[in-house]
Amino acid sequence: MIHYDDDIKKRMKRLEGQVRGVLNMMEEDKQCKEVVAQISAIRSAADKAIAYIVAKNLEQCILEEKEAGNDTSKVVAEAIELLIKSK
């Protein structure tokens, strides 16, 4: 099981703040271009968070598989599949 460190929690809190900011922009009737730009930034931040979580999990799983004397190719394939599905 993965331990979610403070870095990823900070990233998620930042994302939460960005979403609240977009909602405020909508309440203030900001221009579409501005709102879409902020939503694009949110999507980019979410993609980075996903990649970070998958990478940390992959690192841990590889270490566990190596310690058990198992092949690590399956966990690598699963990580790749997670990244593909997240797009």
Image (cartoon, rainbow, N blue to C red):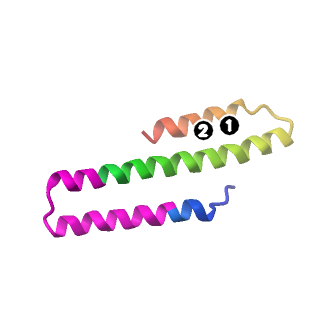
**Residue 67 picture quarter:** top right
Residue 45 percent across, percent down from the top left: 43, 52
Residue at 50%, 52% (x, y): give it. Answer: 49
Q: Residue at x 27, y 63 (%)?
A: 22
Task: Quarter of the image for the C terminus: give it.
Answer: top left
User: Looking at this view, is 67 or 55 the one in front?
Assistant: 55
Name which residue type carries label 2: Ala
Task: Answer with left or right where residue 87 lies relative to residue 82.
Answer: left
Side of 86 relative to 62 (left or right): left
- Disc 2 packing (10 Å; few <14; some 14–19; many ≥20): some
For residue 57, side relative to residue 15 (left or right): right
Magenta-tinted stretch:
11-38
Residue 41 colored in magenta in the image: no
Q: Is residue 79 above or below residue 16?
A: above
Q: Which residue is mark 1?
A: 75
**Residue assigned mark 2:** 79
Location of residue 30 in the rendering, given as x and y in whole percent from the top left corner: 15, 62
**Are the residues at dot 2 and dot 1 in contact (C-beta closer than 8 Å)?**
yes
Tell me: residue 52, above or below residue 85.
below
Label 1 crowd bin: few (<14), some (14–19), many (20+), radius 10 Å: some
